[in-house]
Image (spheres, rainbow, N blue to C red):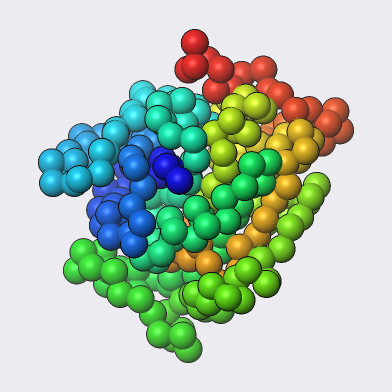
Amino acid sequence: MSCSLIICTYNWPEALRIVLKSALSQSIKPNEIIIADDGSDLTTSKVIESFSNSSSVPIIHSWQEDLGCRIPHSRNRAIARSKFDYIIMIDGDTVLDNDFVKDHLRFATRQVYIQGSRVLLQSNLTKAILRTNEFKKPRFFSKDSKNNINMLRIPFFSKLMSFFQNQNINRIRGCNYSAFKEDIISVNGFNEKITTWGREDSEFVQRLFNSGVKKQHLKFSGIQYHLYHEEREHNSNNDDILKDTILKKSKWCQSGIDTYLK
């Protein structure tokens, strides 16, 4: 199956460099890589250009002006530019297991939103990776990472233990998901009324649920390693937008991806 891998980033070129290395080392490579850039400076552009010049996989820089946190806008722009039927979305601070793309494609199903799991790298290991520009996978019992059970890739168990959820938006993570492009467009993509950090993923997935899409949570597959950074608090206004989507059972947002598809 053909797919577009979208990497969301903002002014962390050191991390993006490591993530791009992992994306280009996949056992099954994506057909294209799109960098959804929420207004990074020229340092990020130079990193992308250096990889583009040597990559057999097309790398597209989808940039928008820095007008504050506009993650939904950035994602919509990138999805609209994608040329392939299946979308895999990650963040620019998540290093991919070599079979990450392969695992997502193996489970790809229409009307299903697939979410993988992540291993949380701790501060010291993250600093070492960024300093050396080389990813070092932590040992299973290492204290350099959390959620270590998620680093086990066991394809046979993955088929048995990956489970479906419907109408459950707990623990939605936009840093590791995939879906058919037509299912994303059917709910008008991400809600651009959200212009601060947080809840954009949950609100988007809730509209998918309202339209009949199910969520499949991958276990022992679709592995990524999240580089350490301080967590941010989400804006309470975004909670209100999410609650409104749940209450009204909305399937469509008024400000979404259709702006870029015209």
Residue 142 at least partly seen: yes
Horizontal and vertical percent for residue 159? 63, 68
Q: Residue at x 19, y 41 (%)?
A: 52
Q: Quadrant of residue 182?
A: top right
Image side of residue 218 versus residue 44, left or right:
right
Give the residue at the far front of this rendering.
Answer: 1
**Residue appearing at x 26%, y 64% in the figure:** 130
Of all residues, the one furthest to the top in this rendering is: 262
Q: Is residue 131 visible?
A: no
Question: In this rendering, is residue 244 above or below 103?
Answer: above
What residue is at 48 percent from the left and 65 percent from the top? 223
Q: Residue furthest bottom?
A: 141
Horizontally, is 116 left or right of 143 in the view? right
User: 107 and 40: which one is in front?
Assistant: 107
**Camera-nearest residue between 225 and 223:** 223
Q: Nearer the viewer, residue 195 or 24?
A: 24
In the picture, measured across the screen, residue 254 lies left or right of residue 97, that is right
Q: Which residue is depicted at the point 73% across and 47% down?
A: 214
**Side of 249 relative to 147 (left or right):** right
229 vs 58, nearest the viewer: 58
Q: Position of residue 217 (x, y in %)?
A: 65, 60
> Residue 14: percent from the left, percent from the top?
26, 54
Please tell me how many numbered marks the rendered image carries.
Answer: 0
